[in-house]
Amino acid sequence: MKENSINNPKLPSQKYCSDCSYPINIEIPEGDTRNRAVCSKCKTVFYENPKIVAGCLLTWKNKILLCKRANEPRSGFWTLPAGFMENHETVEEGALRETMEEAGARSSNARLFLMCNLPHISQVYMMYYGDLDDGIYEAGLESLEVKLFAKEEIPWEDLAFTVIEKTIKLYYEDLEKGNIDIHFDTIIKR
């Protein structure tokens, strides 16, 4: 029985084969256990997998670097520099690339800080922590503004995403404990 992916958002949404242009069927391929997008002619199976978002929490003189988003979703709200990984790069390379693109910033000592599952939007955030090299930053094309914030200046009500708020709060909790740890979490949409 075919189900419509519009009525069930957990089903693949592809409509046509990118190899031969024939319509896509939603079906369980032989040897599989889930509905997939399968070409009605050439039988190519198209898998939809979670997206990896990589970014950095960089600090300079006890302040955190934040970017004001220029693009939707959540344009005009503050975030840590982060974005989708590209093919053929490591997670760390993606985090550092996104940080350079959005905030004109570098870090020579970034290390994994948080891995957070967001199953309701099929994303996994991989956030790194490090020092902002030489205190240098500037707004990139995807940022309206980039600024360093002390703890008491963080615009909590204007943060773009729950995972960004969680990352910053975990960082401050670690500072209070005197040790920056690696964290693993899941955000379930309520």
Image (cartoon, rainbow, N blue to C red):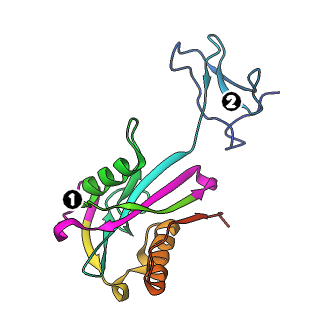
Horizontal placement of 113 versus 10: left or right? Answer: left
User: In the figure, residue 10 lies in which quadrant?
Assistant: top right
Task: Say which residue appears at 46% left-offset and 87% top-offset.
Answer: 176
Residue 152, position in %: x, y? 36, 89
Spatial CA distance of label 2 from label 1 is 40 Å
Image vertical order of residue 55 relative to residue 64, above or below: above
Q: Secondary structure at mark 1?
A: loop
Find the magenta span and give its range: 117-144
Q: Which residue is mark 1?
A: 104
Of residues 141 and 81, the one nearer the viewer is 81
Nearest to N terminus: mark 2 or mark 1: 2
Q: Which residue is mark 2?
A: 36
Task: Choose mark 2 or mark 1, whichever is in front.
Answer: 1
Q: Amino acid at mark 2?
A: Arg
Task: Say which residue appears at 61% left-offset and 17% top-offset.
Answer: 44
User: In the figure, residue 87 lies in which quadrant?
Assistant: top left
